[in-house]
């Protein structure tokens, strides 16, 4: 497990789309696959107070998860976001 890099954007987006498809979590239902920032998670989680980690197996990204401040809440409250594993 390690922090996400810009080179991981495509791989983790692919993981999220794959897992979402397996569970029928489609964009038209408002799930993560509808997020316009899905292909640039490094940039999203490089913001202050946010972090994203990817999990590798044999050199391939097989999952990840992040934390970021909870919107509409106290600034010191965060939430677990975009946690997916194949």
Image (cartoon, rainbow, N blue to C red):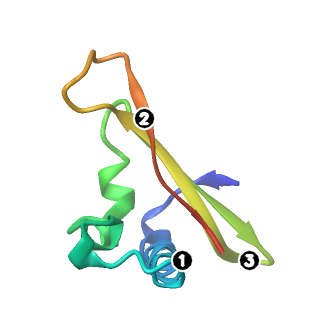
Q: From the image, tell me which residue sits under label 3.
A: 59
Q: Is residue 58 left or right of residue 23?
A: right
Q: From the image, tell me which residue sits under label 2.
A: 79
Q: Is residue 76 left or right of residue 34?
A: right
Crowd around label 2: few <14 · some 14–19 · many ≥20 (10 Å): few
Q: Secondary structure at mark 2?
A: strand
> In terms of sequence position, does the residue under pointer 3 or pointer 2 come before the other?
3
Verify CB contact (< 8 Å) between mark 3 and mark 1: no
Q: From the image, tell me which residue sits under label 1.
A: 19
Q: Nearer the viewer, residue 25 or 72?
A: 25
What number of labels is visible? 3
Q: Secondary structure at mark 3?
A: loop
User: Hey, which residue is sitting farthest right in the picture?
Assistant: 58
Q: Residue at x 39, y 58 (%)?
A: 42
Give the percent coordinates (x, y) of residue 63: 62, 66
Crowd around label 1: few <14 · some 14–19 · many ≥20 (10 Å): some
């Amino acid at each position: 497990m390690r922090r996400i890099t810009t080179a991981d954007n495509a791989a983790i987006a692919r993981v999220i789309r794959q897992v979402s498809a397996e569970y029928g979590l489609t964009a038209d239902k408002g799930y993560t696959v509808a997020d316009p920032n899905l292909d640039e998670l490094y940039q999203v989680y490089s913001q202050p107070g946010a972090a994203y980690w990817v999990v590798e197996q044999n050199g391939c990204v097989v999952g990840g998860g992040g934390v970021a401040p909870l919107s509409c809440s106290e600034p010191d409250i965060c939430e677990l976001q975009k946690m997916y594993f194949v």
